[in-house]
């Protein structure tokens, strides 16, 4: 098994990243194509995926979509494609972060640590959260609706846990953003809105008229439940 899977066709860059991460104590597996990376995910437990976009044959956006459909793990995109449009596509497909190349390997390592910490170091003893037909198993980090597992990005999962843990409370947008992305995040605050809409699409009966996650105008969001 590997803590981190790197899908990157630039062997030299992949090896540099691997070496830095191994110094930090992480086990790393490198896949040179999207197909190889997805095959590895099918048969090996992985805690975090580092994903290049410009890959041969199956590109990184397609890999991100396919990985998110099956696996609940943080996905960090590394891409030479700059601009907000590419970032938005990556986030909407399920990525949790987007780094533009060239980037500092020290920054990448810091982001990896932060995502792993937020995704796996959960100290709350309450391991099950439930509301109607919606259940969160905080041990396995899985979300179920009517007994069916929902595909969740790490950020969507964290947001849902925060909202359900504070049922009935109006949570400020700034607080939610800081809790999930961190005060030092390079993500835009509008990223919260994108993720909240995706979350509503998955758990609401009618996402256009949400009853579980309601907007508190001028403040943020509140989980009302059913």
Image (cartoon, helix red, strand yellow):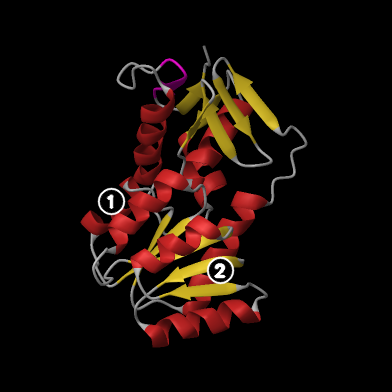
Q: Position of residue 56 (x, y in %)?
A: 25, 72
Which badge, 2 or 1, comes first in the chain's sequence? 1
- Residue 184 in view of the camera: no
Where residue 111 is drawn, which disc sits there? none
Q: On the picture, is 1 further left or further right than 55?
A: right
Q: x, y (%) of residue 224?
A: 52, 16
The quarter in which the N terminus is drawn is: bottom right
Residue 136 vs 58, above or below: the answer is: above
At horizontal 55% and vertical 57% (from top left) the residue drawn is 115
Residue 150 as seen in the image, left or right of residue 93? right
* Residue closest to the eye, 87 or 31: 31
Find residue 164 and report its horizontal and vertical position in percent.
Answer: 58, 26
Seen at 49% across and 71% down, the residue is: 108
Sort mark 1 into few (<14), some (14-19) or many (20+) by Cα contacts within 10 Å. some
Please tell me in which quadrant of the rendered image residue 209 appears. top left
Q: 194 or 130, which is in the foreground? A: 130
Residue projecting furthest to the right: 125
Q: Residue at x 63, y 28 (%)?
A: 165
Q: Is residue 53 left or right of residue 164?
A: left
Residue 17 rendering spot, x and y as whole percentages: 49, 79
Q: Is residue 45 visible?
A: yes
- Residue highlighted by disc 2: 110
Q: Is residue 70 above or below residue 127?
A: below
**Residue 222 is a magenta residue:** no
Q: Does dot 1 land on a helix, a strand or a loop?
A: helix
In what element is the residue under mark 2? Answer: helix
Quarter of the figure with residue 100? bottom left
Q: Gap between marks 2 and 1, in whole Å?
A: 22 Å
Q: Which mark is residue 88?
A: 1
Residue at image x 38%, y 48%?
Answer: 94
Image: magenta residue range: 211-217
The furthest residue to the bottom: 12
């Amino acid at each position: 098994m590997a803590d981190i899977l790197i899908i990157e066709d630039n062997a030299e860059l992949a090896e540099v990243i691997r070496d830095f991460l191994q110094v930090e104590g992480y086990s790393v597996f490198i896949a040179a194509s999207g197909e190889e990376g997805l095959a590895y995910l099918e048969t090996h437990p992985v805690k975090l995926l580092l994903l290049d976009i410009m890959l041969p044959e199956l590109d990184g956006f397609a890999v991100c979509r396919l990985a998110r459909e099956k696996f609940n793990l943080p996905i960090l995109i590394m891409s030479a494609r700059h601009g907000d449009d590419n970032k938005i596509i990556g986030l909407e497909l399920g990525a949790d972060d987007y780094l533009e190349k060239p980037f500092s390997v020290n920054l990448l390592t810091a982001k990896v640590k932060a995502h792993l910490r937020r995704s796996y170091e959960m100290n709350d003893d309450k391991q099950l959260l439930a509301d109607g037909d919606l259940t969160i198993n905080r041990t396995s980090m899985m979300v179920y609706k009517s007994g069916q597992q929902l595909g969740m990005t790490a950020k969507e999962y964290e947001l849902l846990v925060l909202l359900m843990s504070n049922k009935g409370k109006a949570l400020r947008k700034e607080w939610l953003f800081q809790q999930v992305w961190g005060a030092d995040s390079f993500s835009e605050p509008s990223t919260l809105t994108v993720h909240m809409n995706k979350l509503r699409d998955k758990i609401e009966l009618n996402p256009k008229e949400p009853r579980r996650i309601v907007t508190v105008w001028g403040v943020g969001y509140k989980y009302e439940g059913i």
